Image (cartoon, grey):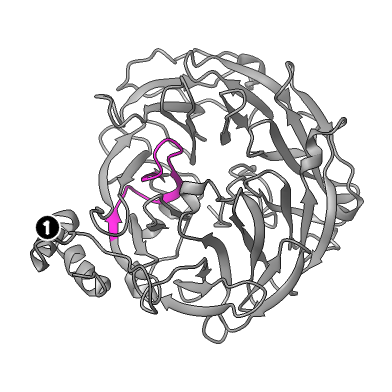
Amino acid sequence: MRFISAQKQYSTYAKISLLGLALIGLASCSSGDSSAPVATSGGSAALQGPIVFVNNTTSKSLVSVALKGDTGNTKLGEIDATKFENVALGDMQFSEGEWVFLNLAAANKVAAIDPLTGAQPVHEANLAAGTRPVHMYRDSNDGEIVWIMNDGDNAGGTLTPGDDLINCAAQGGGSVTVIHNSHLGPGGVPPVVLGTTCLLADGHKVTAFSSGAGMPKRAFVSSETAGEIAVIDGDETSVNFRRVIARIDLCRSAKEAVPATCNDESTTAANAAFTPNGSGPHGIRWSKLTQKVYSIQEGYHEISEIDPVTFTVTPILDLTGLPYTAFGISPNGRFLVLRGQTTAPQGTKLGVLDLSVTPAVRTDFTIPALDGTAPGAFKFSPDGNRFYILAANSALATVTKKDRLFAFDASTLTATPAALTLLREIPLVSTGAHSFDVLAQGAGAATFIAVSNSTDNSISVINATDNLIKQTVQNIGALGSTLGGVMVYAPGTVAAGNQATSSLTGGSSAAPTVLAERLDDHGMPE
């Protein structure tokens, strides 16, 4: 049986909350058939090429656009808000099994979407997570596993996250939920929730994964309010899989307000909460070069290196007096990319920290084209040769340059001294805001960039060869729609390592809301 009517059948399973069990019944369709959705191998019924997913923030719907190239880019369809329980859409990600996932923070759920089987993407089910899932990450050790960060209750509408009231009301603190799936097609298994791990720690959560030869498979999850990092066993073959095996106390007396004392609680019992500190971790990355974790402590204005085995925390860059407030990492793990702004004069400031030497060497770039801009989201192409950054459409009076995407040659980072070479300043549609993502193919080279134009209700497609807009697809949503976050999906992207995900997971919670700092990899605000 070819699984074409996926939406109808999955919606029935979702209602009885037994998605995995109900799918067993599909096996009876044919004695030799799969119990999972089958993506057709050809013909007009199935999708084969890249898709741009766009958050229609006005209608709370998810738009899909076929990304064909310089021309022929057209809207595929729109999954309406009722499928997402009429809540605002959040972070997006996709797995090695080709499933697309979407956080539904207010519903405390994650939507699972089949992007391939039908003529347009199909909503399959909303899976229970924890209280207020905000960010999600694909596990770098197993691309079929997705980790959901549950920031917890924010009663009163404040940005201060609290407890996961669904899973961790007794213990307190937020949590992480783990989802596993296998591939679409014969023998595939649809997404299932493996479970939720309580962290005993409040605050916004981001994560990084240790990986590589000889490295233990672990997830490092920081909690901003608590000032700590939970270390979770990420090895599915381990008896401790999804369990917290250590908690790293980030408190530093030299950086704390009076009284300037810290009681290192890293060895505190697993069921006991730490005393919160002012470190404010928000932004964490794994370097495949150094095989270390890097965390930005916003409260302390510093970046630290963390050993994934001993959990030793070593400050490597004091940001005091520097303009940088957020960071990312180059695909090869060599450079931490520093991003911030100056206000006199106004401008976006970029720099890098070279991790290939000890101590790490910082280079601050002077890029006149960024004068007058406010800093927005940035990304690398997976091969590391291209770097893109948006100018945020800030309401600050000092911001004189808006609606711009800057394309850089990042291969020059390895020069002496390190450099970012501007290739083109790309004027965008004049609108309220923009988000973008990169289509990379082959050996990870950028081929096209998709940019959403919020109140213009359109997306622009840019050719990465000459960095020129080739087509602007109009009327993405109904009249008056406003577009938000963008994610470019293509079959085989994960297996090829071709997703551009070096954007921000940092930025000060105290920063003015006119700055587009607190964004995930796909432009979704926290």
Quadrant position of the N terminus in the picture: bottom left
**Horizontal and vertical percent position of residue 241:** 29, 29
Indicate yes or no whether the magenta region holds residue 432.
no
Q: Is residue 168 visible?
A: no
Residue 342 located left or right of residue 199: right
Residue to which mark 1 is pinned? 24
> Observer-nearest residue: 412 or 282?
412
**Residue 43 visible (yes or no):** yes
Q: Label 1 sits on what residue type?
A: Ile
Magenta-drawn segment: 126-148
In the rendered view, tell whether residue 293 sits above or below residue 380.
above
Above or below, 426 against 337 in this view is below
Left or right of 386 on screen, residue 271 = left
Q: Position of residue 245 (x, y in %)?
A: 35, 21
Q: Nearer the viewer, residue 487 or 446?
A: 446
Local SS, label 1 = helix
The residue at the point 71 percent across, 23 percent down is 356
- Quarter of the image for residue 143 reads top left
Q: Position of residue 457 (x, y in %)?
A: 61, 78
Residue, x 46% and y 22% (percent of image)? 215
